[in-house]
Amino acid sequence: MELTLWTYEGPPHVGAMRIASSMKDIHYVLHAPQGDTYADLLFTMIERRGQRPPVTYTTFQARDLGGDTAELVKKNIKEAVERFKPKTLLVGESCTAELIQDQPGALAKGMGFDMPIVNLELPAYSKKENWGASETFYQLTRTLLKEKVGSSEKISPLRWKELGRRPKVNILGPSLLGFRCRDDVIEIQRILSEQGIDTNVVAPLGANPNDIERLIDAEINICLYQEIAEASCEWLKRNFGMEYTNTIPIGIKNTIEFINEVHNKLDLPLTNKKELEHKSKLPWYSKSVDSNYLTGKRVFIFGDGTHAIAAAKIAKDELGFEVVGIGTYSREMARQVRATAKELNVEALITNNYLEVEDAMKKAAPELVLGTQMERHSAKRLGIPCAVISTPMHVQDVPARYSPQMGWEGANVIFDDWVHPLMMGLEEHLIDMFKHDFEFVDGHQSHLGHTATKTKDLINSDNKKDNNPKEGIIWTESGRAELTKVPFFVRGKVKTNTEKYAILRGIPEISDETLYDAKAYFS
Amino acid sequence: MSKVEFNKETGPREVFCGLTSIVWLHRRMPDAFFLVVGSRTCAHLIQSAAGVMIFAEPRFGTAILEEKDLAGLADAHEELDRVVNDLISRRPEIKTLFLVGSCPSEVIKLDLATVAEKLNKRFLGKIKFVNYSGSGIETTFTQGEDGALKALIPLMEDSNEEKLLLVGTLANNVEDRFKKIFRNLGISNVESFPPRQSTELPKIGKNTKVLLTQPYLSDTVRDLKHRGCEIISAPFPLGIEGSTKWFLAAAKAFKISALKVHEIISPLISRAKLALESHKDILKGKRLFLLPESQLEISLARFLHNECEMDLIEIGTPYLNKDLMKEEINLLPDNTKIVEGQHVEKQLDRVREANPDLVVCGMGLANPLEAEGISTKWSIEMVFSPIHGIDQAADLAGLFSKPLRRNQILTSKTLVTN
């Protein structure tokens, strides 16, 4: 048993719903009790979808358990097929149904329907949402392409040359409830098209079962979100020899590397290599004098694997931040995140306990957090600015405007989204210059609102709550007085650093002098 | 009884399960903690239903069953013990811990009662452990509150003191208003169940007169009766009519004259009628379809028809206790169609066919219906908003007039949708 107060990922059948809802002409019969219908609101409320997910729940009740729940499953499958007339049927079960072992997938297959049926076995007690999405997409691809395995030769990435047409690729992985997936697809298709590359199929988002059968018409696959598409890409490679890309085009460097990777695989010359670096405003905005204040800003990153790894690279190489922490809730991506952390000389945090994330965040004392909606809440509590870079998300992370994360426009969006929560350059310079003005006495509101903490509260709350090594350290009158003079927006950091210094040196009382010693030591 | 048409329907449902009651119960009793013993789905469900637990650590959590727990039950009990210990060491302020059963824990027959009993012995005098089921195979949405309250009844001490007990979670401000009005009527010993602190449980006995504030408390009512309490039969205090009859029923039980009641509440009624006017202008003649979810549907329909002059197409309710709803059903217009249970697809077919002006439904259905051009109101808002009492009648009407007003503003003037 695992004690959970909040969960980053839903159960695996929610992942299956993400695939079913992303696609057309598919219906999912889910053997589940009535409460499980809550999952519909993830799509209709968070994504503001105007359609219900294409899911029929069997809604079994306690009184059905004594009788024949298998009959109930069959009745619901029959009704769903008659009503929705899907081209492909997914059949699966939620956690409770798994326990009663009706095997709805096998039942469906025995009902004599003339359509492909995908039997989803998603172990609810050991796996989670992203795994469920990945497995569903993989099973669907496998089922629909099964008959074509072995019927053709290995697909060469250079086939487009023989066929005398532009190269074609598939874009795999975008789904509903993914982070800005719809806009990413538009951006990536545009970039590829500029390079003379056509998109054969985008899946699962917007695809129908016929499109899945057409996947092998393309030369290579673009694995856009590894969490969801890697298993399918690997299967397509194994069975049809289709190559797939590894670079995730988030950030300028990755986008360029991505374009190069696609070109290398297809043996296609870059048409406008020189122009590439000027496609986005990020590089210039980042170099502009106003961005000087971004130098070495300390950031803490937590999210799914794909977005966290990309964020680290952008933060370090493209914005000049210092990454002081990185982690993911996605155990499937732990290896890659650990590798990134190693390059950054930090310890990777692999956990699905948001309180551990909050603790790590507090210890790292960053100036900016890049996380999920939960880190936004935690950061708010700690008075740290935060930008959301990954699922799970909030309705406000599904904006009306075009807002990709990938490609050139994605880089622009990221620059704005990450920098806006911070105090802007000129603003920060001015505040620094005028810090002795009456405007900056305690109680003056910064844009952080009520979260900018007063010195007294800081000292008191720490003394009361924390059981860390700070215990026993006393702030003298002169020390407190000096700390009050430090502008409120850096006061927390100064305080922590000074205490750290005092512990290091075994100084039991912090006076004004200790504060200056610490300042010199850390500068 | 009016000529009400009753129908039953079975099939796929679109209704929250009883676990979701936790999201208002934990706010009502801040010293209590609700530990669901269930799956990742349960954790995800209450998290999604609560939006997100915003500023503080929530007072609910889930002990997620893992494969090793399913292998052997003895282990599951030990595991639960460990999780409870973890939780309590982290949250020493917890005074009452509800172990909440879920669908998977019901199916594997996890004996939470025995676990609670053992824990009660161990934490004697410090923390009370109770258990109930909020599982979706047995309960819908608001029935979770019924289970939670029923579980607390054995902890309530006996008392023969004469008192009025208001049963069902109320917003604090509504509770305060009610107590003041009862005091003015001459009933000063008024207590609430659930109380604002889980440790301040009211004492009950044969001189306790129970007045229900919510219609979904069948099991709680039964157990209160067993403890000797007298149940006052009344409609529910929604709108002017329901609230007036509710106060009158209470007064009668305390042998206070109806005249006195009218004297005290008539100024409130005139004020509320005035406030209702602007909402009535919008709601009058509009056609209403209520899908099942909160079990407040019948009372809401009665209010919206009798006081706001809406036309009723169909009233869905997940479960119907005709005995508890008797007074409400009597107030409904003739030929009202009530449908107990749900087949969501068939019901939505009827919605589309009837093309109502407003549909009351769960959150999962709201946007899809809006996209079809049908205004909606979420059921869940009724359990979170202070809607009870005469003073709140206009606010209650406002919850329904707002989507219609919005629809008028947007479609008639500024926006072309689709």
Image (cartoon, helix red, strand yellow):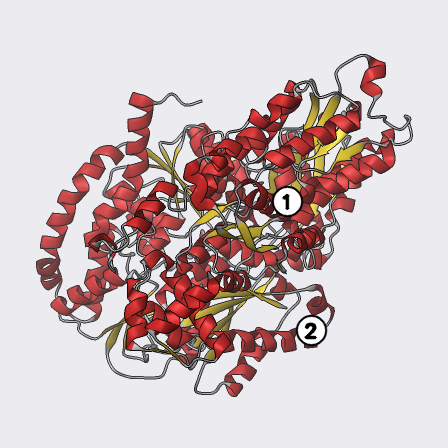
* Residue in view at x 43 percent, y 68 percent: A518
Q: Which residue is mark 1?
A: A306
**With B188 as the anchor, is B159 left or right in this view?**
right
| Nearer-the-camera pick, A83 or B44 | B44
With respect to residue A354, does A412 lie above or below? above
Dot label at residue B73:
2
Residue B384 locus on image (x, y percent)? 35, 54
Q: Residue furthest top?
A: A164
Say what secondary structure mark 1 lies in.
helix
| Nearer-the-camera pick, B96 or A106 | B96
Q: Amino acid at mark 2?
A: Leu
Q: Residues within 10 Å of mark 2 (few under 14, many from 20)?
A: some
Q: Quadrant of the C terminus of chain B?
A: top left
Say what secondary structure mark 2 lies in.
helix
Residue B273 locus on image (x, y percent)? 15, 45
| Nearer-the-camera pick, A45 or B113 | A45
Residue A148 locus on image (x, y percent)? 86, 29
Report how far apart the C-alphas of labels 1 and 2 lie in the structure: 38 Å
Q: Amino acid at mark 1?
A: Thr
Residue B204 locus on image (x, y percent)? 32, 79
Picture quadrant of residue B288? top left
Looking at the image, do the residues carrying marks 1 and 2 touch, with CB atoms under 8 Å apart? no
